[in-house]
Amino acid sequence: MKLHINGENVEVPSSISSVTELLAHFELQDKVVIVELNHDILQKENHAQTNVSDGDRIEIVHFVGGG
Amino acid sequence: MSDRYSRQTLFTPIGEKGQELISRKHVLLIGAGALGTGNAEALVRAGIGKLTIVDRDYVEWSNLQRQQLYHEADAANRMPKAIAAEKRLKEINSEVNVVAHVMDVTTEEIEQLVQGVDLILDATDNFDTRLLVNDISQKYQIPWIYGACVGSYGLSYTIFPGKTPCLNCLLETVPLGGATCDTVGIISPAVQMVVAYQMTEALKILVEDEEALRNKLVSFDLWKNQHTAINVNRAKKESCKSCGSHPTYPYLSAGSHTKTAVLCGRNTVQIRPPEPKKLHLDQLAETLKKQGGEIDLNPFLLNFKMGDHRMVIFKDGRVLVHGTKDIAEAKNLYHRYMG
Ligand SMILES: [Zn+2]
């Protein structure tokens, strides 16, 4: 499956169906993240039931503490 | 001296009028690490009226790769970061009123620090302090600018009370230590990129050009060539305890700050006395010497090495216990030597 993530074309396994699975794929499952799917910001509680499909534009920002 | 700011005033969105505004503003900068030194230098060069800089730590050799105000002597002498930064900043621009505090910022300190402040810049390394800053910003309606970085990644967001969501809205939960304790290193361009984002937004706020604010959560990874900006306005929550319709400012209540803290990625525990003290470090040095330890002293702190352990004791009574992440062990050492 081809996704457009943070401005880049990225190929991810087609077994990934939800936003939660996508975050796990990028090892972001333990991070606090903000996800935008096709220009719509998602509520965190909806990550598990929100599906991703071929061609989606996704923006992912994760919070870090360093400074 | 008269054309000191000429390249900045020639820039139309600032101009002479903007420069005049900048010269009357007071910025509170919390943290004097990588982001702190970058932002501080930029603000002072830009001619900020007053800069208050606060930090709880001292300069170490591993800081010199990216913390731009410090040099080798600061690391060799273990100078408190706030003091070393103040000295260098005054050399860069003697017209700026630079005020430095060597202290840990919690509820009591922040209430004092924000008096008369126009903007708060975040250069801390932890979410406890950021959420404290977030609450005080809402309570007194002072904008603040979040910035953070790790590896080649960084992000920033400008919180404008009454207009944007706050950090509490965006996070929902406090990130756990493990997920944000950054032990993967950092390259200096990631720092500089966050500083550039923070400082540009700061200049817009200082010259009162609110229209120009970015209004987006921005992040980048310089090594992976990624960049993203998200409009997060929809994340603002009416029910938010920090910025909603019935705020309680949960992070300003005294109980939420413990007297001990494990410093992220540092194998170090900080212990604060219940009340700040005014220690006589030279007397303490004599006492500790009698117990057989190795002592180094500068006017601001005492470095004490005994066997496998090392403690750094500040004048205000704070102690950094190095070589452990175990709070119980650190407390044990603290009480053994500090009574
Ligand atoms: Zn909020």
Image: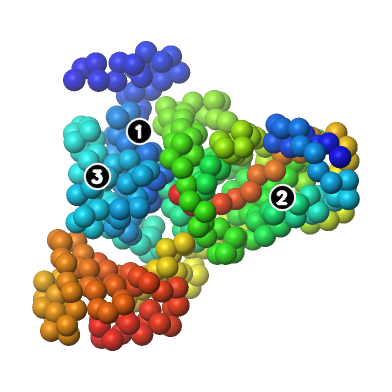
In the rendered image, which residue does mark 1 sit on?
B42
Name the residue nearer the viewer: B26 or B57.
B57
Tag 3 near tag 2, CB within 8 Å = no
Nearer to me, B154 or B105 = B154
Q: Which residue is mark 3?
A: B71
Residue picked out by circle 2: A26
State the residue at coordinates (52%, 46%): B151
Mark 3 sits near ligand 1, with its Cβ under 8 Å away = no
Picture residue at 73% right of the left edge, 45% below the top: A35
Q: Earlier in the sequence, mark 1 or mark 3?
A: 1
x 61%, y 33%: residue: B225
Q: Percent from the top left, x then y, of residue B274?
A: 34, 76
Count of residue discs: 3
Quadrant of the image occupied by residue B227: top right
Corner quadrant of residue B89: top left
Q: Residue B167 at x, y = what percent?
A: 58, 50
- The relative height of residue B142 versus residue B18 in the rendered view (above or below) is below
Residue drawn at the location 83% of the way across and 36% of the way down: A2
Mark 2 secondary-structure assignment = loop
- Report helix, strand or loop for mark 1: helix
Q: Position of residue B240 (x, y in %)?
A: 65, 56
Please state, as top left, top right, bottom left or bottom right, where the C terminus of chain B lies in the image: bottom left
Instruction: Look at label 1 and name its amino acid.
Output: Ala
Q: Along the horizontal axis of the image, is B203 left or right of B167?
A: left
Is residue B23 at all visible to an observer of this figure? no
